[in-house]
Image (cartoon, rainbow, N blue to C red):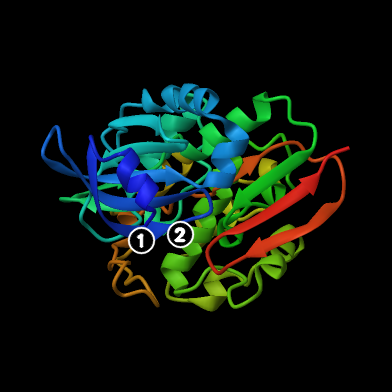
Amino acid sequence: MSDRLTAALADRYTIERELGAGGMATVYLAHDIRHNRKVALKVLKPELAAVVGASRFLREVEVTANLQHPHILPLFESGEADGFLYYVMPFVEGESLLMHDVADALAYAHARGVVHRDIKPDNVMVSGRHAVVMDFGVARAVSEAADQQALTTVGMAVGTPVYMAPEQALADPAIDHRADIYALGVMGYELLTGAPPFSGRAPQQVLAAHISEAPEPLAKKRPEVGRGLADVVMRCLAKQPDDRWRTADEVAHRLEALATPHGGTSAVRAVTSKPTSWAIAVVGTVAIVAAVAIGIMRENSEPAATVSSSASTWVRAWSIC
């Protein structure tokens, strides 16, 4: 970790160790000196911080920091210190898990015009017996702040190819909550089969597949999954947004119906290749949730040569005329 970062926050937080890193931020376990508690401290990547700017970022974070829901992890604070843009959340000890709680959180946020843009298994945590969604707001803050600046030379999309809807892969500026619903299907597919659609390919190939290739039907890949549940997941994965479920609330209600005695859904063990981070779920109570991280700043030309990719995060930059 940076000595400069440690020094910049020394009067408020003692940084203990790095917990992980994504396309937009690095997360640290820290001790909140004033309140004597453990927190998750997320620091925006320097390249994004430079583009977005402190005042714009903090104004945009404030919008989604006001979301109050039992299954949305709250923001303790956000700020700027020696050029670092950061935000602080509760530190939740638990395993990543997809549950009905997450769909409930998505429905709440979508009803208020907020698309998460950065849900993935690592951003869904279990606290006690409940799931909470992390990072509502940060991807939106980066996206909205960058879009509202008068940027004329650089555009950027940040996302996770595995969970990216076709319209996101195409950097469509009209993306709405239905992109989250597509990722809902991706994560449900992964929960039930052990791997997401199009796994084992390079990031660019995964993006191309999301745009043009139909995933293998879930019912064929795992026949023991009930027809109703398989249909819910596959409808989420429709290429055209209009062909998906209209809302996350619809998905949650449909799964609840399947879980009733007349719904025909029995308990199914979740298949997983990640035993340390995915739990066994009773499918009737799982609202396979949604996720996507994408920040879009206008695209008006062909992709530039700057492309970086990893197994978890992909960033593409464009030159803007």
Residue 284, by quadrant, is: bottom left
In x, y percent, where is residue 133?
35, 44
Residue located farthest toward the left when viewing the structure as drawn = 36
Q: Is residue 93 left or right of residue 58?
A: left
| Residue 101 at least partly seen | no
In x, y percent, where is residue 215?
64, 68
Residue occupying image coordinates x 58% and y 67%: 310
Residue 187, relative to residue 108: is it above or below? below
Residue occupying image coordinates x 71% and y 47%: 167
| Residue 195 at least partly seen | yes
Q: Label 2: few (<14), some or many (≥20) within 10 Å? A: many
In x, y percent, where is residue 66?
36, 23
In x, y percent, where is residue 199?
58, 73
Residue identified by numbered label 2: 229
Between 49 and 220, the residue placed more toward the observer is 49
Residue occupying image coordinates x 29% and y 62%: 282
In which quadrant will I find the N terminus?
bottom left
Kind of residue at disc 1: Thr
Q: Label 1: few (<14), some or many (≥20) within 10 Å? A: many
Secondary structure of the residue carrying numbered label 2 = helix
Between 35 and 172, the residue placed more toward the observer is 35
Kind of residue at disc 2: Leu
Residue 12, by quadrant, is: top left
Residue identified by numbered label 1: 265
Label located before the other in sequence (1 or 2): 2
Secondary structure of the residue carrying numbered label 1 = loop
Please say if the residues under marks 1 and 2 sit with CB atoms less than 8 Å apart.
yes
Q: Is residue 203 left or right of residue 229?
A: right
Mark on residue 23?
Answer: none
Alpha carbons under labels 1 and 2: distance apart: 8 Å
In which quadrant will I find the C terminus?
top right
